[in-house]
Amino acid sequence: MIPVLSNCVLLIEPDDSLASQLAFDLQEAGYEAIIAANATSGLQQFQEVQPALIVIDRMLSGESGISLCKNIRTIGQHPPILILMARDTVDDRAACLEAGADDYILKPYRSEDFLQLVRLYLKPDVDSNEQLRFGDLVLDISSRRVLHNGKTVDLTMKEFELLKFFMEHPREVLTREQILENVWGYDFMGESNVIEVYIRYLRLKMEEEGQKRLIQTVRGVGYVLRES
């Protein structure tokens, strides 16, 4: 198995100028950047290099960035994936999550916002044997593994962090502001229902086969992890 390069970011970006700017900013911040101009070369680089993080432009020639993200996830590898896109609608966010992306970056490109997001996803893991438990739900901190009713739940990095925050505060009503501050760790510009989108997909993964709802909506306030 090819080892994951902890400081390497794969950029799949067809715009030469934007790709060069992204790579320059990453290198200035101490990361290694690899550029692929299309989906085919991007998938090949991913399989050969095993980067720690992937940035994909949604608008790729020949294949959409969303489709490429899905293809990478079917391989069974789970590095954080960020989608670079021009629009910020509910459907756009939902499409990113459905494809298995962890987050998205909006155009026009802003260096500091981009690097802040990269640092968030590439911060060093802290070794821990800690497990969080809530009923039949088990979350292992070090392996980033989630079990629900004895079955593995496959989560993206951001979904894992969101569930972890809920499990650290069981039966406590959490406001949207608390969730954004503690899970995303950076300011969301403008009005956004990004939390609702993530919780929707987290619920879909945890409520298969008619399993009871654990993350419940508290109208006008936020959300709570509880049995009923």
Image: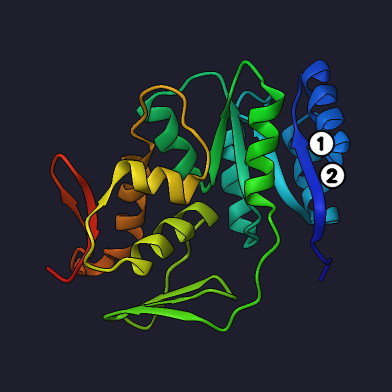
Q: Compare marks 1 and 2 and give the one earlier in the sequence.
A: 1
Are discs 1 and 2 less than 8 Å apart at CB?
Answer: yes
Residue occupying image coordinates x 76% and y 31%: 38
User: For mark 1, what is the residue?
Assistant: 26
Give coordinates of residue 119: x percent, y percent.
69, 45
**Toward the viewer: 41 or 89?**
89
Image label count: 2
Above or below, comparing residue 183 to residue 208 in the picture: above
Q: Is residue 141 left or right of residue 134?
A: right
**Residue at the image position 47 percent from the left and 65 percent from the top:** 154
Amino acid carrying mark 1 in the image: Leu
Report the front residue among 53 and 110.
110
**Residue for point 87% across, 34% down:** 28
Going by the numbered disc 2, the residue's amino acid type is Tyr
Give residue 204's quadrant in the image. bottom left
Residue 62 position, x and y percent, is 68, 26
Residue position marked by numbered label 2 in the rendering: 31
Quarter placement of the C terminus: bottom left
In this rendering, is residue 149 above or below 69? below
Residue 137 picture location, percent across and down = 34, 76
Coloration mode: rainbow
Q: Quadrant of residue 192?
A: top left
Disc 2 element: loop
Is residue 124 shown left or right of residue 25? left
Q: Residues within 10 Å of mark 1 (few under 14, many from 20)?
A: many
Q: CA distance from mark 1 to mark 2?
A: 5 Å
Of the pair 125 and 71, the residue shown nearer to us: 125
Q: Residue at x 60, y 79 (%)?
A: 128
Q: Residues within 10 Å of mark 2 (few under 14, many from 20)?
A: some
